[in-house]
Image (tube, helix red, strand yellow):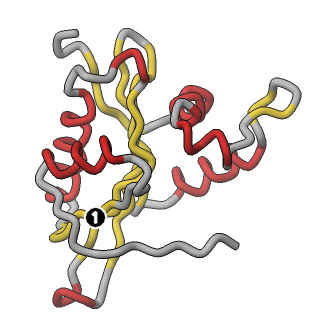
Amino acid sequence: MGGDFKFRRASLDDLEAIVTLILQDALAQEREAPLDNGILDQRYREAFHKIDADENQYLMVVDYAKEVIGTCHLTLIPSLTFKGSTRLQIEAVRVSQKHRGKKIGAKMMEFALDYAKKKGASIVQLTTNKERPEAIKFYEKQGFKVTHEGMKLYL
């Protein structure tokens, strides 16, 4: 694959490719509803515009040969804990099925950590579903430690 891929801020033109990557995840099949008569659901566009307008959010894509092959969503969170530190939350990490195993995910994590440092974050955090043991192994390989038990309440 070489180094012919680049990391950049997502544009609205990337949205369908990002949603397609999200849908490659088996767990997403249960909760996503991307198309309405072949048209991308408006809620994705609205969410994209909110993310794009927020200076504490960075929706990143990995571009390879004019194709979006990876994505992740980075959010800076100011905090009163840890002496008023800033955290970076990493979410929605996806790499195209046909490009997995090529160290793209590791490069994305490298990008995210560099971004966190540049923005003055002192903690980087993420969650992953317990039904994804391969993801947990991947994040541990990147230096992350399982330190907390996460909880969610769907409304």
The residue positioned 53% from the left and 72% from the top of the image is 152
Which kind of residue does numbered mark 1 sit on?
Gln
Secondary structure at badge 1 equals strand
Name the spot of residue 143 as percent of width and height, x first.
11, 53
| Residue 5 figure quarter | top left
Q: Is residue 36 above or below residue 85?
A: above
Nearer-the-camera pick, 22 or 88: 22
Residue at figure coordinates x 27%, y 70% from the top left: 87
Q: Position of residue 48 (x, y in %)?
A: 60, 47
Residue on which disc 1 sits: 125
Q: Residue at x 77, y 40 (%)?
A: 41
**Quarter of the picture holding the C terminus:** bottom right
Q: Residues within 10 Å of mark 1 (few under 14, many from 20)?
A: few
Q: Residue furthest right?
A: 37
Q: Nearer the viewer, residue 34 or 118?
A: 34
Q: Residue at x 33, y 47 (%)?
A: 133
